[in-house]
Structure formats: C-alpha cells, structure tokens
Amino acid sequence: MEWSLFENAYKGKKVIITGHTGFKGSWLSLILKKMGADVLGYSLTPPTSPSHFDCFNWGGESVIGDIRDLENMSKVFQKFNPDVICHLAAQPIVRQSYVDPLETLNINIMGTANIFEVSRKLKNLKAIISVTSDKCYENKNWVWGYRETDPMGGFDPYSVSKGCAELITSSYRSSFFNISDFGKSHQTLIASARAGNVIGGGDWAQDRLIPDVIRAIQKKEIVEIRNPNASRPWQHVLEPLKGYLMLGVKLLNGETFYADGWNFGPPNSESFSVLKVVQQMQSFWPEINYKITQSELNQHEAHLLKLDCSKAVDSLKWRPCWDFEKTIENTVEWYQHYYNNEVISLKQIEEYFSK
C-alpha cells in the first residue's frame, strides 16, 4: 500500500538517490518507494555486512556505480532522466578520512562536482537535494548553533570535504542553475541539506557510537567509549529525511526561495554528550556495558557542535517529532527486533509520519 505523504508530490516522479545502499540512503529509498515514486539508486555495494539496505526488498532499480566515474554515471542518469536527484553518496566517517584522506576528498568533493556536471545535461530535472553534514562549518567549539550563513571550513579531511561540497553546490547554483534564470534558460533548483549525528536502526558503520555499542553487546563485550564529554545534536534518521523531502516538494513546485542551504537538527537544548547517549541506551538495554578509554589515535575531534535550525522551522515549517529519549528508545528497539529476526523499519516510518 502506498502512503499519501507530502500531498502525493512524489507519486509517479522519477527520483535518483545516490548512496541508496548506505544508512540514510536506504531509509530514504524505502520512504520514496512507499510514496509511489519511481526510484533508481546509484551507489557502491552496501558498505557493511549486515546493512540496512539488505534487510528488505525495497522494489526500486539498483545500479552499482561510483560517483567518481563520470562517464558511467552520465549514461545511467541520462537514460533514467529523473525529475529529482537526492545526492547522499559519500565517504561518511571522520576517522576514515585520516586513514585515506585522498579517497575522502575525491569522493566527497569530485563526486559531488560530477553529480552537478551530469545534471546539466538532464532534460527533465527539476530538483537537486545535495546532502552534506553539520561538519561543513568552520567549527569554533562555541555554544551557539551554526547558521546557514556561517563560513564553511574544517579541521580534518572529512570536514574539509563537506565544506568544499557546499562550496561546489553554491558555485553550480550560481553559475549554471542561477535562480534569476529559473524558468528561462533552465528549470532546475538546487538545495543543500546539513545534518549530523543521525542515528537509528540499521547502521553498522565502523567508528560510530551506536554501531560500536551494538557490536559490543552482540559479542558480549564491554564497549570502549572515547571522548565521553563530546556533545552532539543527536537525531533520528527520519528527522532530516523528512526535511529533505519537504525541501524537494518546494523545489518541485518551483519555489526559488528554497534553493539554498538548510540545517536540520534538534533544538539546541537537546545536545547531549556521548556518555549520556550510552547511558540512555543502557536504560533500554541493561546488558550494555561500557568503559571510558583514551583513544590511542592522536586525532582532532570537536567537543561541541550545534546547528541553528530556525530557518527550517520558520520558513519550511519543519519540526522534529521525536525527542532525545524517544530517539534512543526507537533506535534500541530496532536492533532488539532485528536480532530477534524482525525488521521494523516500515513500522517505525509509519509511526513517525503518523505524527
């Protein structure tokens, strides 16, 4: 049964999702298919085993490809001829960017540029949503949330790559998809979306807090917590995905105001430490055991990072639905059901959007 969400704006629309085999991309693929969109996913194979993508038969067309391969991607995109592109493909791990910085820079910077270069030749394309990260901002470790007008920056290669991806998005918007020329020389509007510390069921990535805890409990081990006092704006994966979809509706409707950068995150009062997250998980899953350790890798990690999301709240009318406790509860519940041979992604999506 299809869902009548967003006034059926995506029903029958042709949507390409890059990174559809990843954590966020797989959840987005599932939602769009249930809304009646014609979805093509373009991505590398799932980055982990198990993976959320492999938990269900989502019913769309899946193409295994690399966004660094401009020639192949161009053929696939031109053949499908989408109305919407949701660009989520990326190297998403900060610590991996220290291990192989060139890989991270190539995927996140040149891969993004390739998306926009291919898009210039697509006849029916009306909307591009380019997803980056809250780490695109120059982090000054201050207590205020970063606004969309704050400067891009980054200490580690991952953060730099996301700042550059935002600059590339802005450059293509200005140079080839300028809002002043919309409806004249082109029909495509571009928005970028910045969200970070997204959690939820189905994430098994390395060097992420929730998957680290889940792996430890499955192995009956004590999870080691580094940087326990680092504060982050944790949010369930469905929160920013709702924001991306709301943005897409505005772009499909030709509303040029929304062709801009947007932050999606919880209220500033809901920024919690790494230690608090683990303790909250433990309250729902008492078997979790942890210890605080000092990382052997001498790598920079920001201790404080917040987003100011008032623009999305005021102008897009986007609101988070689940508070911190509900987010942790639903995340833990997903894994508990998974390890009892039940996947509850659709159930959680229905619960979320019913609100």
Image: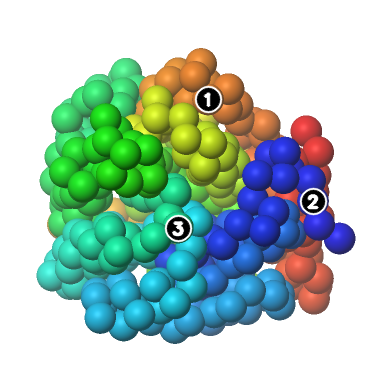
Q: Residues within 10 Å of mark 3 (few under 14, many from 20)?
A: some
Quadrant housing the C terminus: top right
**Circle 1 residue:** 316
Tell me if residue 125 comes above or below residue 175 in the rendering. Answer: below
**Circle 2 residue:** 3
- Horizontal side of residue 55 vs 163, given as left or right: right
Q: CA distance from mark 1 to mark 3?
A: 25 Å
- Horizontal side of residue 229 vs 157, given as left or right: right
- In the rendering, which numbered label is found on residue 124? 3
Residue 278 versus residue 39: which sits nearer the camera? 39
Q: CA distance from mark 1 to mark 2?
A: 21 Å
For marks 1 and 2, the one nearer the N-term is 2
Three-letter amino acid code at the position of disc 1: Leu
> In the structure shown, which secondary structural element does the residue marked by tag 2 occupy?
loop
> In the structure shown, which secondary structural element does the residue marked by tag 3 occupy?
loop
Three-letter amino acid code at the position of disc 3: Asn
Q: CA distance from mark 2 to mark 3?
A: 25 Å
Residue 270 versus residue 24: which sits nearer the camera? 24
> In the structure shown, which secondary structural element does the residue marked by tag 1 occupy?
helix
Residue 247 versus residue 146: which sits nearer the camera? 247
Q: How many marks?
A: 3
Q: Quadrant of residue 202?
A: bottom right
- In the rendering, which numbered label is found on residue 145? none
The mark lying in front, picked from 2 and 3, is 3
For marks 1 and 3, the one nearer the N-term is 3
Name which residue lies at 65% across and 44% down.
Answer: 9
- Horizontal side of residue 54 vs 261, given as left or right: right
